[in-house]
Image (cartoon, grey):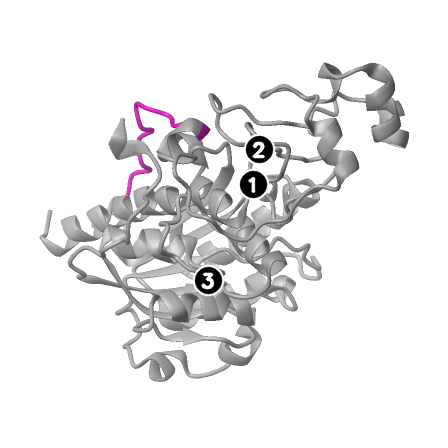
Amino acid sequence: MEEHICMNTSVAPAESAFTTIELFAGAGGLALGIEKAGFDTLALIEVDRDAADTLKRNRPQWNVICDDIANISPLDLPEYFNIEVGQLDMLSGGAPCQAFSYAGKRLGLEDTRGTLFYHYAIFLEKLKPKTFLFENVRGLLTHDGGKTYTTITNVFENAGYTIQKKILDAWDYGNAQKRERLITIGVRNDLVGKIKIDFPEPHEYKPVLRDVLQDVPDSLGTQYSKYKRDIFALVPPGGYWRDIPEDIAKEYMKSCWYMGGGRTGILRRMSMDEPSLAVLTSPSQKQTERCHPLEPRPFTVRENARIQSFPDDWEFCGSVGSQYKQVGNAVPVNLAYDIALEIKKGLERFQCGN
């Protein structure tokens, strides 16, 4: 069981043989898992100052570029990163989901201009890495009636890549959290058949909050108002608004009381014997609340980091609000590790001629 729970010690990278550049790096959840799998991170691009400072503080040796990617993608990228075209082993990252223009009939690269994905695609076309890892929310599959992801796959294929996709739940990969991500992996067409990459197999044990909320170091965190705290004190672990007196719930929920659906996210209190719902970018959002199982309060930054499988010595920079946002936006480290490890295995087999 122990091998599946949250990493609580410093992550030491394996012997590095393969190179990666990461775009939209955030606070480093994806990069940390990729590093642990044995990749040498050549550069990370992140526009948010606090997130970039987080990366620099924890990995001073990383080349962290705090800039708008729109300022980087027009450059001669092989010269900028001092690598040959086709030499990079993996490009990684996940551009925020944005609608495209659909100005052209082929729904290709030009239709993505003005979006952040456009710059990911430019990096892919200019660097021609052997593989790429593109992660995003599950909703990307159905965004704009499926047109957005169709355009993305067209761009990947036009850039010369064969892709495979799968929705993976972080809970299956050593994270005490239900968090689904759409994972798209690409292999350059000239290497198809030579580099075979499998998606990781789910772990036998799926951790719950009890596995990761023991002996959590003190950290920044916000509190509920006294009014809200007193109401949450009435909610049992694993419960929500239906588990308290109706008159109190109705007064708290106001107009939400008359909405349809289960509204199970309102006054939601987690249980130690279940995984967390997806960690949020804010500690208190009325229709998607995650109250601590044992105390009437939100999770602290460090508790959320544990749920996201960050090691305890990974420090976050900026205000408490910024830290919550960085942790909530991150890819769970353990999930990133399992995916990157499979990509590394594919590259190793190719390198060994198997």
Q: CA distance from mark 1 to mark 2?
A: 6 Å
Q: Is residue 251 left or right of residue 62?
A: right
Q: In the picture, which quadrant includes the N terminus?
A: top left
Numbered badge on residue 292: 2
Q: Is residue 335 left or right of residue 237?
A: left
Residue that carries the numbered disc 3 in the rendered image: 25
Label pair 1/3, CB-CB below 8 angstroms: no
Specify the amino acid type for callout 1: Phe
- Residue beneath the point at 38% across and 28% down: 207
For marks 1 and 2 on the same chain, the one whose residue lies earlier in the sequence: 2
What x and y, as percent, mark residue 3? 25, 33
Element carrying mark 1: loop
What x and y, as percent, mark residue 60? 33, 73
For marks 1 and 3 on the same chain, the one whose residue lies earlier in the sequence: 3
Specify the amino acid type for callout 3: Ala
- The stretch in magenta equals 197-209
- Residue beneath the point at 75% across and 28% down: 231
